[in-house]
Each structure stands twice: as structure tokens, then as C-alpha cells.
Image (tube, helix red, strand yellow):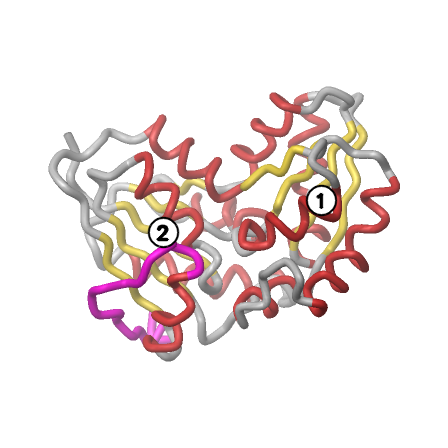
Amino acid sequence: MDNRPIGVFDSGVGGLTTVRRMHEIMPNENIIFFGDTGRVPYGTRSAETITRYTRQDVSFLRTFDIKAIVVACNTVSAVALETVAAEIDVPMIGVVWPACRKALAVTKTGRIGVIGTPATVRSGVYERFLHRARPALEVFTQACPLFVPLVENGRVQRGDIVIETVVAEYLAALRAQDIDTLILGCTHYPLLREVISAYMGSHVHLIDSGAEAADHARQMLIPAEGRGKTKYFVSDDPESFRSLAGLFLNGEIADEVGHVEIAKY
């Protein structure tokens, strides 16, 4: 058994969808979550800035005796994971390959869509992973830069004309490509699952990249014993985070949320 905590981080609160899945399938694990809410979103920033932010996030998590880091951020997984993972001696688990593995398992037509931040889509990482595994696949991508700020502001419900309009604007081209699988290439996007599914149709499999990363972590890590605890830290207002976190966790955070001056790391 290994009771050391697992570090989890994201550019904002989207990584809580990964934490929620970890709570479901790994209830014995201790988790340290850091959300860089003061600098969200990462997806519109340069690769150099994303890598610098990632190093700082990882440095903070390593102040705890962590056994692994789950990068609950597609942008970081796409742009900075390989570089930063080579610099430390703690395993880093990204979201890209677990999501690709699931998409490969469920697609019947070989027509897969990927939505993500501009940085994730620009990186081409999903196409590379998917085509490396199965060259004949047809992969269609779409950047959705407004999804993260809309989710962070709670605009996630069916019937909300703002989010439904934006979803239709972004996903019209993918729907026209007759895909049968859509990778939600950002950990914020599962909160839009109902709106996206209603627009794309129930025949399209939606792949939750953060949940797949949690499943992968369970498979590769030595488990803990006892009842796990989760500690939460953010780089902006803890109370704002607490009020929004309930959307992602299906329940409020009872414990104190810590504030981190992340630029010091």
C-alpha cells in the first residue's frame, strides 16, 4: 500500500471532474488538488507560458510527498507534459492517451471528433496519438475557446440560450462530418455533456478525458488503504472556487480551501 497523496492540477476548476471520478473509483486515495484559478484559461496562451505555469503548478504539488501527478488539463497534457515530466522523478499522468484509448475502443466508423482549447487543438496531439494507433482513422478537430469561461461562470444548462448558441456555432462542422465519437478534450467540457449530446445526437459517444485519466491512474498506481481525504488549493479567491466547485463535484466542499501565491514556485 502507498498512502502518499496523488497531486491533481488544472488551469481552473475543470479538473474537479477528474477528482470526482477519482472519488468514485479510488475512495481510499488522498488527493491534493490545485486549481490555477487566477490564471485561467491556459488554452489561449503561448506554449512557453503554459510550460512555465506547469512547472510552477508541479513545484507546488511537490511540496507534498506525492506519489504521482494527474494532469487534469488537456492544454498542459498537449503542450507541456512531455517537457516537464522529463524534469522530475514523480510520475505524471496526462489525459490525452487515456481519452484516445477509449475513443479507439468505442468508434465503429473510424470518424472521431475532438474539441478542446485553441492550444490543445493547435498542438495536434490527439491526431498524432490516434493516427499512430490506427492510421486509417479520420479525425476532425474544433477549438472551442468560449467553453471554459462559460463553464467557469456556470452557463452549463440545457435551455440556456447562450451556451446552446455557442455549442451550435462550434459543433456544426463536426456534426456535418457524421462522426460517431467525440472526445471532450478539456476537463471543463463534461459539464456541457447534456447540451453537447442534445446537439450532436445520442448516437455519438462522448469521451470524458478527465475520467479516463482517473481510470488510468487507478490501473497504474499502488493503491492506498483507509479512507482518503482531499485538500483543495487555488490561486484566486477560495470562496468563489467553493461556490463553483459544487457543480463539478455534485456536492459542496466542506473543508477550508487554501490560497496559493503560485508565482512564487
Residue drawn at x 69%, y 36% as measured from the top left: 202
**Residue in the foreground of this view, choosing between 47 and 139:** 139
**Residue in the foreground of this view, choosing between 102 and 252:** 252
Residue 247, given in percent of the width and then of the height, sits at 44, 60
Residue topped by disc 1: 124
Q: Quadrant of the C terminus?
A: bottom left
Q: Earlier in the sequence, mark 1 or mark 2?
A: 2
- The answer to whether residue 61 is above or below residue 26 is below
- The answer to whether residue 53 is above or below residue 181 is below
Q: Amino acid at mark 1?
A: Gly
Residue 135, given in percent of the width and then of the height, sits at 76, 22
Q: Amino acid at mark 2?
A: Val
Question: For the view shown, which residue lies furthest in the left direction?
Answer: 226
Q: At numbered mark 1, what does the secondary structure look like: helix, strand or loop?
A: loop
Residue drawn at x 54%, y 56% as measured from the top left: 188
Q: CA distance from mark 1 to mark 2?
A: 24 Å
For label 2, the crowd category at 10 Å Cα-Cα, with few meaning under 14, some 14 to 19 and many 20 or more, is: many
Residue drawn at x 55%, y 49% as measured from the top left: 190
Image-quadrant location for residue 109: top right
Residue topped by disc 2: 8
Chain part drawn in magenta: 247-265
| Res 181 label | none
Query: Which label lies toward us, 1 or 2?
Result: 2
